[in-house]
Amino acid sequence: MYYLFMVNMAKLPLFRALAGVSAALIFSLLLGPPFIRFFQRNELGQKIRPEGPPQHFSKQGTPTMGGLFLFFALYCVTFLLVDFLQPQVIAVSTALLLFGCVGFIDDYLKLRRKQSEGLSAKGKLLLQLLASCAVLIYIRIFSGHETTMLYVPWRSGPIIDLGFWYYPLGVLFIMLFANSVNLTDGLDGLAGGLVIIVLLFISSVAALGSYASGTAMNQQYFETALFLVILVGAVLGFLKFNMNPARVFMGDVGAQGLGGAIAVAAIVLHMEILAAAAGAVFLIETLSVIIQVFSFKVFGRRVFRMSPLHHHFEQKGVSEKSIVYGFWAAGMICAGCSALVYFVVFH
């Protein structure tokens, strides 16, 4: 019965996409209020780091782990509209769940200890490493020798076969994105809005690629694009409660899960280079932390007033909303330039 339904729905791709994003948005909006009330009743709120920006202390106690109802909305709709047995969809979905679990453990420990520190840095990196390896092994199984190819999306051939080096680089790519989204999730609505921008870019290119002549995996590309579009709807619903002043934070469970899903989607769709360019704001946020730590340890001085970069602007007196909208605009420019490169230069 399910496959009969999927065959009929496959003839209406635009309908499935619109139905998916709308349903995920509605589910997310409906699930948000009871989730927030539950966390408020049980005093399961965010603990603010003492060394963080002083203006953030007013956010102490705001419900966290909003990624949970976001993901629940996603999977409720996914099981109805997406052929979730497609290997690419399984890979992206697995990455979201595994990295979400790492984030959940981190959030749970923070709430249990009633402090801002959860997993140790080494413990978090180890779990992320294991999650990345598990996903890459699965991708290798269903992709075979094509796994190690670095592609310009849907062109006639790969740029280069990285061979063995694809795997450590792939692990680094996934972990970098997961941690970058997590670091960016420091202002109300900031990470969620940027995630939507990158997801829309990846899903649009994937959907168009599914109709490209000579593409052997049309159905997989489309189903993956549909999964990402539904995720956009779920994140949009979450943003209703996460915009300033935030009623809920996505927590590590949401930020790490979304970052891992974006990275793996880029890998299975062979668009690592373009996805990194479209998500450049995430990577710049991480780079600002690396520069800050390196400069302080080597030269004893800080480059930024505070890192990640969004906190630097906060310390300079820029309002939180202005920073968020400015970073969103930068994200749109990055995604727009990536789209321009893809459609104009490579096609």
Image (cartoon, grey):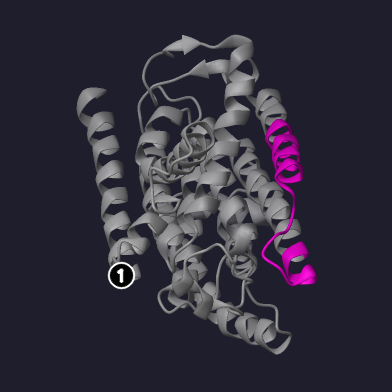
- The residue that label 1 is drawn on is 319
Q: Amino acid at mark 1?
A: Ser
Q: Can you give x and y, in whole percent of width and height, for residue 217 in the image?
A: 51, 29
- Label 1 secondary element: loop
In the image, is 35 to the left or to the right of 299?
right
Q: Can you give x and y, in whole percent of width and height, for residue 315 in the image?
A: 36, 62
Q: Is residue 112 magenta?
A: yes
In the image, is 62 to the left or to the right of 192?
right
Q: Is 319 located above or below residue 330 in the figure?
A: below
Q: Is 135 located above or below residue 332 in the figure?
A: above
Q: Is residue 12 visible?
A: no
Q: Is residue 64 magenta?
A: no
Q: Which residues are magenta?
A: 109-134
Q: Is 63 located above or below residue 268 in the figure?
A: below
Q: Is residue 92 visible?
A: yes
Q: Main secondary structure of the magenta part?
A: helix
